[in-house]
Image (cartoon, rainbow, N blue to C red):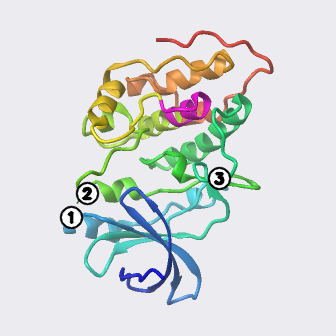
Amino acid sequence: MTVITERVRGYRLLERAGQDGPWAVHLARSAATGTDVLVKTLACHRVDKRALKRIIRGFGFPEPLAAHAGVIPVLEVGATGDGRPYLVTPVHEGLTLGDRPGRSLPMPPAQAAGLLRAVAGALAATHAVDGVHGRVKPENVIVTAGGVALTGFAMSALMSIVELPDGTVPSVHAAPEELEGRAPEPASDVYALGSMVYELLAGRPAFPLDGPGSTARFTLGVLTESPPPLPAGVPGELADLVMKATSKDPDARPAAADLAAFTMSAGAPRGAPPL
C-alpha cells in the first residue's frame, strides 16, 4: 500500500491517481463539503512565494468558461504544507486521450478532425475570456462516451513561478516561442493543438522527444525545421490546416475559433502540405 505523505489543507488525500510530468495527481476528499475531487501538486525546488500569493489571491475561474461542456474547470489553487503550488479540479469520467484502451495510431482523419474541432472549441472559449491554456497535450484531453473535454488549466501559470526538478523536459507539443522562453499566448495553444493532431494523424510527433539527449534535437527541430509530410491518406484540407496551425510564426496561425469551425469535405483528396 502506498503511503501518501502530501499535506494539502482542507483535503484528505485518498489515493494516488496518476502523474502528469512534475504534477502528482491524487483522488481527495474535501473536508468542507465531503465531495471527492482531484488534487494536483507540483514537484519543484524553489517557488516565487510572492507570485504564488498573487495567483492565489486573484484566482477565479471565469464562469462562462466553467459552464462550457468541453472544459473541466479549476476549483481552487493554493499552497501545500511545504509551500508548493497545488490545484483542485472536479473528478471526471473518462480517460485521457493518451491512456484510453485500444488506442491505435494513426487515427482516422475524420476522427482526428472531430477531436480537433472539440478541443478548439474549448480553446476558443478560453481565449474569449482573455485566457490561455498553455498545456494542450493528449494527457489533458479527456475522452468520454459523451464527447471530449479539456483539463490542465492553470498548470502552465503555476509552473512559470517555480524551479522545476532537474531533468524535466518540455511538452513535445510546446510552441517555438515557448521554447525561446516566452510566455504562452493564444497562438501557442493553437500550435499545441495542431501538433497534437499531427501526432494523431502521423502516428508520431513531428519532432519526437525520445530519450536522454533528445531535448536539444527536439528544440532545434521545432525552431528551424518543417514537419515531415503527413501520410498520403490524410485529406489535403486537413493536412493544410494542421500545417498552418503549427507555423513557426504565431501571427500566421489560425485562431482557435477558426479551427473549431473546420469541416472536412467527404472524400477530399489529399494535397501536399506546405513546407
The front one of 84 and 25 is: 25
Whole-percent x and y of residue 29?
A: 53, 84
The front one of 229 and 190 is: 229
Of the two numbered discs 3 and 1 in the rendering, the one whose residue sits closer to the viewer:
3
Q: CA distance from mark 2 to mark 3?
A: 28 Å
| Residue at screen point 26% across, 63% down | 44
* Mark with earlier residue (3, 1): 1
Q: CA distance from mark 1 to mark 2?
A: 6 Å
> Is residue 78 covered in magenta?
no
* Quarter holding residue 84: bottom left
User: In terms of secondary structure, where does tag 2 sit?
Assistant: loop
Whole-percent x and y of residue 274?
A: 51, 12
Q: Residue furthest right?
A: 266
Type of amino acid at the residue the image marks with label 1:
His
Type of amino acid at the residue the image marks with label 3:
Arg
Residue named by callout 3? 100
Residues shaded magenta: 195-205
Q: Residues within 10 Å of mark 3 (few under 14, many from 20)?
A: few
* Mark with earlier residue (1, 2): 1
Residue named by callout 2? 164
Residue named by callout 1? 45
| Residue at screen point 59% across, 40% down | 120
Whole-percent x and y of residue 43?
A: 31, 65
User: In terms of secondary structure, where does tag 1 sit?
Assistant: loop
